């Protein structure tokens, strides 16, 4: 029997976040729900023993195969990928997801898994894509990061997706067929850049832009968000990541002008 929801969680050097018990929180929440579910952890070539921690946390205790196990009626799968960056890890998880609804969320749980309750009702209203929105006042962000986020928003809206306020929240849900269709269309995978460390980029912008172009119905829903990420490698790369995102917005705009999304 296929699960109702697949929760895809990309992972790169997340041991510090894992030690906070984030996976247990996700599992505990899902096991209380009436619907069936699966958690797909898609590792992006971690080098900090994140994978070892996950295996010891779930697999060794249950003595089941590494790639699939069950924790209190919640199926848990671990995918070990070569390093490619967040979009590649998310895509690998999407490909394996069998749920009617697919949610991808960040390991740090800055938006807690329970916020999915705000997203799911929109699928009953025939929406195809339902995305979380953090608003402008982002708890845990410094003044500089809040300012940079607003500049990014103004720049992106001038070029793409004027109706959407927050493209970058790592809490997005899709109908299964829609998620698989959209990720198969992303041009970011056609010419992958060499990646060192945790590369996020603005693949969400291209994803939502293609969804809009293909006529999928998109809902943007306010969710709780507070920065809980303690993976230091990611925290140190905010400026570099911002520059990468700006370049990718321009790339998507140029691709559109060239008719590559038609």
Image: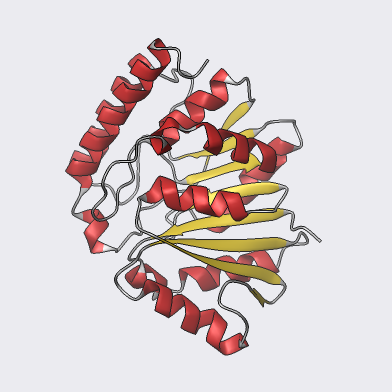
Drawn side of residue 222 relative to residue 169, left or right? right
Q: Position of residue 121 (x, y in %)?
A: 71, 41
Residue drawn 38% across and 19% down? 255
Residue 118 visible to an observer of this rendering: yes
Q: Position of residue 31 (x, y in %)?
A: 69, 69
Numbered marks: total: 0
Q: Position of residue 214 (x, y in %)?
A: 60, 21
Residue drawn 75% across and 61% down? 36
Q: Is residue 17 above or below residue 177?
A: below
Q: Nearer the viewer, residue 254 or 156?
A: 254
Where on the picture, by quarter, is residue 258?
top left
Drawn side of residue 112 relative to residue 69, left or right? left
Residue drawn 57% across and 49% down? 94
Residue 143 visible to an observer of this rendering: no
Please identify the residue farthest to the right as the structure is shown.
1
Residue drawn 39% across and 11% down? 257
Instruction: Please identify the quadrant where the N terminus is shown.
Output: bottom right
Q: Nearer the viewer, residue 177 or 118?
A: 177
Q: Position of residue 223 (x, y in %)?
A: 51, 44
Q: Is residue 69 above or below residue 239?
A: below
Drawn side of residue 218 relative to residue 151, left or right? right
Where on the picture, by quarter, is residue 4?
bottom right
Q: Nearer the viewer, residue 60 or 171?
A: 60
């Amino acid at each position: 029997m296929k699960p109702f929801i697949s929760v895809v969680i990309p992972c790169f050097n997340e041991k510090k976040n894992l030690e906070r018990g984030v996976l247990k929180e996700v599992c505990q929440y899902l096991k209380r729900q009436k619907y069936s579910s699966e958690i797909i952890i898609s590792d992006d070539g971690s080098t900090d023993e994140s994978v070892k921690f996950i295996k010891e946390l779930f697999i060794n205790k249950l003595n089941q195969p590494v790639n699939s196990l069950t924790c209190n009626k919640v199926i848990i799968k671990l995918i070990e990928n070569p390093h490619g960056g967040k979009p590649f890890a998310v895509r690998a998880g999407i490909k394996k997801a069998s749920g009617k609804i697919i949610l991808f969320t960040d390991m740090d749980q800055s938006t807690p898994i329970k916020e999915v309750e705000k997203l799911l009702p929109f699928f009953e209203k025939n929406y195809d894509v339902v995305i979380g929105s953090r608003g402008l006042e982002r708890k845990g962000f410094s003044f500089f990061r809040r300012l940079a986020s607003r500049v990014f928003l103004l720049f992106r809206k001038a070029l793409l997706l004027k109706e959407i306020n927050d493209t970058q929240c790592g809490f997005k849900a899709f109908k299964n067929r829609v998620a698989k269709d959209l990720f198969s269309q992303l041009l970011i995978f056609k010419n992958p850049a060499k990646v060192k460390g945790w590369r996020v980029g603005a693949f969400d912008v291209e994803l939502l832009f293609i969804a809009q172009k293909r006529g999928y119905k998109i809902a943007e829903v306010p969710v709780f968000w507070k920065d809980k990420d303690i993976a230091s490698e990611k925290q140190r790369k905010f400026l570099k990541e911002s520059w990468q995102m700006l370049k990718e917005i321009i790339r998507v705009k140029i691709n559109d002008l060239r008719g590559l999304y038609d």
